[in-house]
Amino acid sequence: MGHRPVKETAWVVRLGAVPYAQALELQEQLRVKRQEGELPDVLLLLEHPPVYTRGRRSRDADELAFRPEWYAEQGIEIVTVPRGGLLTYHGPGQLVGYPIVRIKDVVSHVQALEDVLVAALADEGIAAHSRPEDGPAYMGVWVDGERKLASVGVHVAHHVSTHGFAANVDNDMRPWEWVTACGLPGVRMTSIADERGETALTRPPANEPLALERPPSETLERFSGHVVRRFAERFERKLSEVPFEALGVELTDPDEPVAVAGPIS
Protein backbone atom coordinates (compact mmCIF):
# COMPACT_ATOMS: atom_id res chain seq x y z
CA MET A 1 0.00 0.00 0.00
CA GLY A 2 1.19 3.52 -0.77
CA HIS A 3 1.69 6.09 1.92
CA ARG A 4 -0.16 9.38 1.98
CA PRO A 5 2.17 12.37 1.62
CA VAL A 6 2.81 14.21 4.87
CA LYS A 7 0.94 17.52 4.90
CA GLU A 8 2.81 20.69 5.71
CA THR A 9 1.80 22.39 8.95
CA ALA A 10 0.17 25.81 8.91
CA TRP A 11 -0.85 27.96 11.86
CA VAL A 12 -4.23 29.52 12.58
CA VAL A 13 -4.35 32.58 14.82
CA ARG A 14 -7.68 34.04 15.95
CA LEU A 15 -7.21 37.72 16.74
CA GLY A 16 -10.69 38.95 17.57
CA ALA A 17 -11.32 42.63 16.72
CA VAL A 18 -8.22 44.42 15.39
CA PRO A 19 -7.93 48.00 14.03
CA TYR A 20 -7.09 47.90 10.35
CA ALA A 21 -3.73 49.69 10.64
CA GLN A 22 -2.56 47.14 13.19
CA ALA A 23 -3.57 44.26 10.96
CA LEU A 24 -1.70 45.82 8.05
CA GLU A 25 1.45 46.16 10.16
CA LEU A 26 1.09 42.59 11.41
CA GLN A 27 0.77 41.21 7.89
CA GLU A 28 3.92 42.99 6.78
CA GLN A 29 5.94 41.61 9.68
CA LEU A 30 4.65 38.10 9.07
CA ARG A 31 5.31 38.37 5.35
CA VAL A 32 9.00 39.05 6.02
CA LYS A 33 9.20 36.18 8.51
CA ARG A 34 7.53 33.82 6.05
CA GLN A 35 9.88 34.87 3.24
CA GLU A 36 12.86 34.18 5.47
CA GLY A 37 11.50 30.79 6.51
CA GLU A 38 11.04 31.75 10.16
CA LEU A 39 7.35 30.78 10.15
CA PRO A 40 5.13 28.26 8.39
CA ASP A 41 2.11 29.46 6.44
CA VAL A 42 -0.24 31.40 8.73
CA LEU A 43 -3.99 32.05 8.51
CA LEU A 44 -5.14 35.07 10.53
CA LEU A 45 -8.86 35.24 11.36
CA LEU A 46 -10.25 38.51 12.71
CA GLU A 47 -12.77 41.32 12.53
CA HIS A 48 -12.22 45.04 11.96
CA PRO A 49 -13.91 48.18 13.26
CA PRO A 50 -15.75 49.98 10.41
CA VAL A 51 -13.31 50.78 7.57
CA TYR A 52 -13.33 51.16 3.81
CA THR A 53 -10.16 49.86 2.17
CA ARG A 54 -9.22 50.87 -1.34
CA GLY A 55 -7.02 48.90 -3.73
CA ARG A 56 -4.50 50.01 -6.32
CA ARG A 57 -7.15 50.77 -8.95
CA SER A 58 -9.44 52.84 -6.73
CA ARG A 59 -10.59 56.33 -7.73
CA ASP A 60 -12.60 58.75 -5.57
CA ALA A 61 -15.09 59.72 -8.24
CA ASP A 62 -15.98 56.10 -8.96
CA GLU A 63 -16.36 54.82 -5.42
CA LEU A 64 -17.25 57.41 -2.78
CA ALA A 65 -20.74 58.92 -2.88
CA PHE A 66 -19.97 61.43 -0.09
CA ARG A 67 -17.07 63.49 1.16
CA PRO A 68 -14.54 61.71 3.41
CA GLU A 69 -15.68 63.89 6.32
CA TRP A 70 -19.18 62.41 6.08
CA TYR A 71 -17.83 58.86 6.40
CA ALA A 72 -15.71 59.93 9.36
CA GLU A 73 -18.86 61.22 11.06
CA GLN A 74 -20.36 57.74 10.65
CA GLY A 75 -17.30 56.24 12.35
CA ILE A 76 -15.78 54.75 9.19
CA GLU A 77 -12.09 55.06 8.31
CA ILE A 78 -10.88 55.17 4.68
CA VAL A 79 -7.54 53.46 4.01
CA THR A 80 -5.62 52.86 0.76
CA VAL A 81 -3.79 49.53 0.67
CA PRO A 82 -1.38 47.76 -1.74
CA ARG A 83 -3.69 44.93 -2.75
CA GLY A 84 -5.48 44.17 -5.98
CA GLY A 85 -9.07 45.16 -6.50
CA LEU A 86 -11.08 48.25 -5.66
CA LEU A 87 -13.02 49.48 -2.64
CA THR A 88 -14.36 47.07 -0.04
CA TYR A 89 -15.80 47.40 3.45
CA HIS A 90 -14.94 45.75 6.76
CA GLY A 91 -16.91 45.93 9.99
CA PRO A 92 -18.01 44.00 13.09
CA GLY A 93 -19.86 40.81 12.20
CA GLN A 94 -17.79 40.19 9.07
CA LEU A 95 -15.17 37.42 9.04
CA VAL A 96 -11.83 38.57 7.64
CA GLY A 97 -9.09 36.10 6.74
CA TYR A 98 -5.47 36.98 5.94
CA PRO A 99 -3.49 33.94 4.74
CA ILE A 100 0.23 34.73 4.90
CA VAL A 101 1.29 31.89 2.64
CA ARG A 102 3.94 31.00 0.10
CA ILE A 103 2.34 30.64 -3.33
CA LYS A 104 3.37 29.85 -6.89
CA ASP A 105 0.55 31.44 -8.86
CA VAL A 106 -1.69 34.39 -7.98
CA VAL A 107 -4.69 33.28 -10.04
CA SER A 108 -4.66 29.79 -8.54
CA HIS A 109 -4.33 31.26 -5.05
CA VAL A 110 -7.36 33.52 -5.52
CA GLN A 111 -9.38 30.62 -6.91
CA ALA A 112 -8.38 28.48 -3.91
CA LEU A 113 -9.61 31.16 -1.49
CA GLU A 114 -12.90 31.37 -3.39
CA ASP A 115 -13.21 27.57 -3.21
CA VAL A 116 -12.69 27.68 0.57
CA LEU A 117 -15.47 30.23 1.00
CA VAL A 118 -17.89 28.42 -1.32
CA ALA A 119 -17.39 25.18 0.63
CA ALA A 120 -17.70 26.93 4.02
CA LEU A 121 -20.93 28.60 2.92
CA ALA A 122 -22.28 25.23 1.78
CA ASP A 123 -21.65 24.05 5.35
CA GLU A 124 -24.02 26.86 6.39
CA GLY A 125 -26.62 25.72 3.86
CA ILE A 126 -25.94 28.55 1.40
CA ALA A 127 -25.28 27.72 -2.26
CA ALA A 128 -22.62 30.11 -3.53
CA HIS A 129 -20.13 30.19 -6.38
CA SER A 130 -17.28 32.18 -7.91
CA ARG A 131 -17.37 33.93 -11.30
CA PRO A 132 -13.90 33.46 -12.88
CA GLU A 133 -15.36 33.61 -16.39
CA ASP A 134 -16.44 37.23 -15.81
CA GLY A 135 -12.93 38.55 -15.13
CA PRO A 136 -11.03 40.17 -12.22
CA ALA A 137 -13.78 42.68 -11.42
CA TYR A 138 -15.95 39.78 -10.29
CA MET A 139 -13.49 38.14 -7.92
CA GLY A 140 -15.15 36.88 -4.77
CA VAL A 141 -18.13 34.70 -3.96
CA TRP A 142 -21.67 35.21 -5.22
CA VAL A 143 -25.16 33.89 -4.59
CA ASP A 144 -27.44 33.34 -7.61
CA GLY A 145 -24.92 35.12 -9.81
CA GLU A 146 -25.99 38.59 -8.69
CA ARG A 147 -25.55 38.99 -4.93
CA LYS A 148 -21.96 39.26 -3.67
CA LEU A 149 -21.36 37.72 -0.25
CA ALA A 150 -17.56 37.67 0.04
CA SER A 151 -14.69 39.71 -1.39
CA VAL A 152 -11.20 38.50 -2.25
CA GLY A 153 -8.10 40.64 -2.85
CA VAL A 154 -4.45 39.73 -2.38
CA HIS A 155 -0.97 41.21 -2.62
CA VAL A 156 2.06 39.07 -3.45
CA ALA A 157 5.71 39.97 -2.78
CA HIS A 158 8.55 37.50 -3.34
CA HIS A 159 6.08 34.59 -3.60
CA VAL A 160 4.36 35.31 -0.26
CA SER A 161 0.75 36.46 -0.26
CA THR A 162 -0.90 38.90 2.17
CA HIS A 163 -4.45 40.28 2.44
CA GLY A 164 -7.11 37.72 1.58
CA PHE A 165 -10.89 37.57 2.00
CA ALA A 166 -13.83 39.12 3.83
CA ALA A 167 -17.15 37.30 4.19
CA ASN A 168 -20.31 39.08 5.30
CA VAL A 169 -21.82 37.04 8.13
CA ASP A 170 -24.23 39.22 10.13
CA ASN A 171 -22.59 42.65 9.84
CA ASP A 172 -24.49 45.92 9.37
CA MET A 173 -24.83 46.17 5.59
CA ARG A 174 -25.68 49.89 5.37
CA PRO A 175 -22.07 51.00 4.70
CA TRP A 176 -22.11 49.01 1.45
CA GLU A 177 -24.99 51.22 0.28
CA TRP A 178 -22.95 54.40 0.79
CA VAL A 179 -20.28 53.52 -1.79
CA THR A 180 -19.77 51.79 -5.13
CA ALA A 181 -18.67 48.41 -3.84
CA CYS A 182 -15.86 46.61 -5.65
CA GLY A 183 -16.05 49.04 -8.57
CA LEU A 184 -19.37 47.54 -9.71
CA PRO A 185 -22.20 50.11 -9.90
CA GLY A 186 -25.46 48.54 -8.85
CA VAL A 187 -23.89 45.47 -7.27
CA ARG A 188 -26.03 44.03 -4.48
CA MET A 189 -24.08 42.94 -1.43
CA THR A 190 -25.49 40.18 0.75
CA SER A 191 -24.57 38.24 3.87
CA ILE A 192 -25.30 34.93 5.57
CA ALA A 193 -27.92 36.69 7.70
CA ASP A 194 -29.50 38.36 4.65
CA GLU A 195 -29.76 35.04 2.83
CA ARG A 196 -31.65 33.69 5.85
CA GLY A 197 -34.03 36.64 5.96
CA GLU A 198 -32.51 38.08 9.14
CA THR A 199 -32.40 41.65 7.80
CA ALA A 200 -33.20 43.17 11.19
CA LEU A 201 -29.58 42.33 12.07
CA THR A 202 -28.03 43.69 8.91
CA ARG A 203 -30.15 46.74 8.09
CA PRO A 204 -31.15 48.54 11.30
CA PRO A 205 -33.07 51.85 11.20
CA ALA A 206 -31.31 54.64 9.28
CA ASN A 207 -30.99 56.79 12.40
CA GLU A 208 -29.21 54.07 14.38
CA PRO A 209 -25.44 54.65 14.48
CA LEU A 210 -22.99 52.01 13.32
CA ALA A 211 -21.66 49.72 16.02
CA LEU A 212 -17.90 50.24 16.26
CA GLU A 213 -17.52 46.87 17.95
CA ARG A 214 -19.62 44.01 19.26
CA PRO A 215 -19.12 40.46 20.54
CA PRO A 216 -18.88 37.82 17.78
CA SER A 217 -22.13 35.96 17.18
CA GLU A 218 -22.58 32.21 17.30
CA THR A 219 -23.01 32.26 13.51
CA LEU A 220 -19.67 34.01 12.99
CA GLU A 221 -17.84 31.65 15.32
CA ARG A 222 -19.40 28.60 13.66
CA PHE A 223 -18.65 29.91 10.16
CA SER A 224 -15.02 30.60 11.09
CA GLY A 225 -14.75 26.93 12.07
CA HIS A 226 -16.05 25.91 8.66
CA VAL A 227 -13.48 28.20 7.00
CA VAL A 228 -10.61 26.67 9.00
CA ARG A 229 -11.64 23.14 8.07
CA ARG A 230 -12.16 23.94 4.41
CA PHE A 231 -8.88 25.87 4.25
CA ALA A 232 -7.04 22.80 5.56
CA GLU A 233 -8.68 20.65 2.88
CA ARG A 234 -8.21 23.00 -0.07
CA PHE A 235 -4.64 24.03 0.77
CA GLU A 236 -3.70 20.51 1.93
CA ARG A 237 -2.30 21.71 5.23
CA LYS A 238 -2.32 20.29 8.73
CA LEU A 239 -3.63 23.23 10.74
CA SER A 240 -2.67 24.02 14.31
CA GLU A 241 -4.15 26.89 16.33
CA VAL A 242 -1.48 28.89 18.13
CA PRO A 243 -1.51 31.97 20.40
CA PHE A 244 -0.52 35.37 19.10
CA GLU A 245 2.81 35.19 20.97
CA ALA A 246 3.91 32.24 18.82
CA LEU A 247 4.23 34.60 15.86
CA GLY A 248 7.20 36.36 17.46
CA VAL A 249 6.11 39.87 16.51
CA GLU A 250 5.33 43.03 18.45
CA LEU A 251 2.83 45.70 17.51
CA THR A 252 2.90 49.35 18.43
CA ASP A 253 -0.36 49.12 20.40
CA PRO A 254 0.16 47.36 23.74
CA ASP A 255 -3.55 46.46 23.84
CA GLU A 256 -3.26 44.16 20.84
CA PRO A 257 -5.56 41.17 21.50
CA VAL A 258 -3.90 37.82 22.08
CA ALA A 259 -5.33 34.68 20.53
CA VAL A 260 -6.15 31.68 22.65
CA ALA A 261 -4.62 28.35 21.70
CA GLY A 262 -6.97 25.49 21.00
CA PRO A 263 -7.29 22.26 19.04
CA ILE A 264 -8.63 22.05 15.50
CA SER A 265 -11.97 20.27 15.55
Image: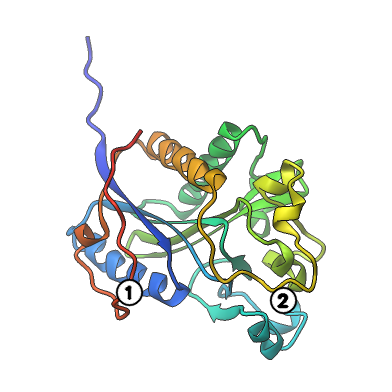
Give me the residue at 73% from left, 47% from top. 198
The three-letter code of the residue at mark 2 reads Glu
Q: Earlier in the sequence, mark 2 or mark 1?
A: 2
Pinpoint residue 210: horizontal percent, then vertical percent. Answer: 66, 71
Q: Nearer the viewer, residue 28 or 201?
A: 201
State left or right for residue 225 relative to residue 238.
right
Question: Do labels 2 and 1 touch, CB within 8 Å?
Answer: no
The three-letter code of the residue at mark 1 reads Asp
Q: Is residue 181 above or below residue 264?
A: below
Q: How many marks?
A: 2
Give me the residue at 56% from left, 75% from top. 56
Pinpoint residue 97: horizontal percent, then vertical percent. Answer: 46, 55
Give the residue pinned by disc 2: 63
Q: Residues within 10 Å of mark 1 (few under 14, many from 20)?
A: few
Give me the residue at 54% from left, 50% from top. 217
Q: Which residue of the protein is positioned furthest toward the top in this rendering? A: 1
| SS class, disc 2 | helix
Q: Nearer the viewer, mark 2 or mark 1?
A: 1
| SS class, disc 1 | loop
Q: Which mark is residue 255?
A: 1
State left or right for residue 7 relative to residue 82.
left
Q: Residues within 10 Å of mark 2 (few under 14, many from 20)?
A: many
Pinpoint residue 174: horizontal percent, then vertical percent. Answer: 73, 66
State left or right for residue 196 relative to residue 232.
right
Report if residue 86 is visible in the image: no
